[in-house]
Image: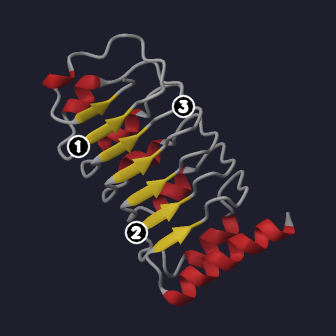
Amino acid sequence: MAQDVANVARRVNEAVEEGKTHLDLSNCKLISFPDGVFKVLRTVTENIQTMTLADNELKALTNKFFATFGQLRELDLQGNVLTKLPDAVGGMEHLTSINLARNKLQSFPERLVDIPTLESINLEGNEITDLPLEKLRAMPALKTVNLRSNPLEGQVCDASSLSFELILNP
């Protein structure tokens, strides 16, 4: 446990000291996003453009997380146990890519459709049964949605009528 905390602290301090644009907190056994990280990063949050929180044990992220890191362009949350995203995710004005593969989402995170810059959504390996296709069609920048290994309930229409690539089970 102490080693995991030290690992997170080391990675955060490196990002601050070196002015990095990427923060990698993958494989840190995080259950939640540590409040202490907000304090340490407050002077450099605008520099962080990509963040990896992959392969942790995150059950939820707070509105504070998305408000603090509103400038993110890429967010990797794969391999956690997220069941939903807070409403504040819809305010991510610069986000182009979100990876939510291998989580526990049972429904499509509808607030993602409020992000005008979003190009890529990876939801592979979740428990999603339904898609808001009309809302996805209205997303101006959307290029790909990966829904492999989800139990979609047959309402997926002819993919040729979509303006983005919909990746489903072969």
In this rendering, position of residue 24 left or right of residue 140: right
On the image, the x and y values in percent for residue 13 come to 63, 82
Looking at the rendered structure, the kind of residue marked 2 is Gln
Q: Is residue 56 above or below residue 104?
A: below
Q: Earlier in the sequence, mark 2 or mark 1?
A: 2
Q: Is residue 140 above or below residue 48?
A: above
* Residue furthest to the front: 170
Identify the residue under disc 2.
Answer: 49
Mark 2 or mark 1, whichever is nearer to me: 1
In this rendering, position of residue 28 left or right of residue 170: right
Mark 1 or mark 3, whichever is nearer to me: 1
Looking at the rendered structure, the kind of residue marked 1 is Lys
Q: Which mark is residue 105?
A: 3
Within 10 angstroms of label 3, few (less than 14), some, or many (20 or more) residues? many
Identify the residue under disc 1.
Answer: 143
**Foreground: 93 or 74?**
74
Query: What is the spatial separation of the Cα atoms under label 2 and label 1, in whole angstroms?
Result: 20 Å
* Residue furthest to the bottom: 17
The quadrant where residue 84 appears: top right
Q: Earlier in the sequence, mark 2 or mark 3?
A: 2
Give the residue displayed 23% in from the left and 43% down from the top. 143
Give the residue displayed 45% in from the left and 72% down from the top. 48
Looking at the rendered structure, the kind of residue marked 3 is Leu
Which image quarter holds the N terminus?
bottom right
**Foreground: 118 or 166?**
166
Q: Earlier in the sequence, mark 1 or mark 3?
A: 3
Give the residue displayed 40% in from the left and 59% down from the top. 74
Give the residue displayed 64% in from the left and 70% down from the top. 37
Query: What is the spatial separation of the Cα atoms under label 2 and label 3, in whole angstroms?
Result: 25 Å
Q: Is residue 144 above or below residue 64?
A: above
On the image, the x and y values in percent for residue 142 come to 23, 43
